[in-house]
Amino acid sequence: MRVQHFSGRSKRSIHLVLLFGLVLGLFVSVPARGEEPYDLKGRITEKLSRVPVPGAGVSILETKFFAVAGENGEFVIKNVLAGTYQMMIEKDGYIPAVLKVSASGEKKEIFIEAALETLKKEVTVTADAFSRAETVASSGQLLSGTQVRTLPGIFEDVSRAIQIVPGVASSGDFKNDLIVRGGSPAENLFMVDFIQVPGLSHFGSQNSSGGSVGLLNMSLVRDIEFYTGGYPAYFGDKMSSVTRISLREGSRSRV
């Protein structure tokens, strides 16, 4: 058996080699911070309704990264290096949006939420003057909800809006009674979508169809048909006036 003896110089050389190998192994096994790729995840919705926008294209400008949003408006772009990018979101019928995205930090997943604004290609504007219902030869007025909402000094009250029609008077500024052709405020008929209601006011007065505060929200009104006389027989036997209010059609796709 042969025994090999190392000198002090040889031992120091071996120690240096082992130390160098250990340090080199640490540099190889531990990656430099910031070099790991990032995953960009996000969700695209409409700006007003917050409904997801499926099929929207998501691209990072000046790169090859691209993704398409799924049915829930969600998208994923993987293996993005650290840095600051310009992200473009496009979809037919919407205004393109450009977002600034920064891929940095310890978290390797970055969530992005974007909202697209609807692009209206065609807008139809129809302006109608105060028109008269075809079934009534006289004493009838048709007021659209847009016209009524823009009237000054009505305090979002349907009855106060009708008070400006010719042939209608009021009992004072603190009540919205309708006095039509000198009749009693109790002689007026009110109908909401062909459903008869006793009045359109909170805190109604006795023997009157009016009160102090309006009952209906003006944002829900589509149009108002107001008759001071000569109204059709199916409206009943009221002696002063008939007010028929049609409400706006709600959305059938969302709340």
Image (spheres, rainbow, N blue to C red):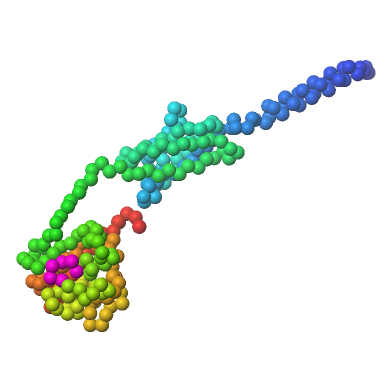
Horizontal arrangement in the rendering, residue 30 relative to residue 101 (left or right) = right
Give residue 236's position: percent from left, percent from top.
14, 76
Residue at horizontal 43 percent and vertical 43 percent from the top: 114
Residue 8, quarter of picture? top right
Q: Is residue 195 above or below residue 112?
A: below
Residue at horizontal 30 percent and vertical 56 percent from the top: 251
Horizontal arrangement in the rendering, residue 155 relative to residue 182 (left or right) = right
Is residue 190 covered in magenta? Answer: no
User: What secondary structure is the stretch in magenta mostly built from?
Assistant: loop
Q: Is residue 69 above or below residue 21?
A: below
Q: Is residue 72 above or below residue 205?
A: above
Give residue 80's position: percent from left, percent from top.
52, 32
Residue at horizontal 28 percent and vertical 65 percent from the top: 155
Give residue 89's position: percent from left, percent from top.
40, 37
Give residue 127's position: percent from left, percent from top.
17, 52
Instruction: Give the extent of the magenta segment.
Output: 163-168
**The N terminus lies in quadrant:** top right
Residue 159, quarter of picture? bottom left
Residue at horizontal 12 percent and vertical 70 percent from the top: 167
Outermost residue to the left: 137
Q: Nearer the viewer, residue 239 or 235?
A: 239
Q: Is residue 236 above or below residue 104?
A: below
**The C terminus lies in quadrant:** bottom left
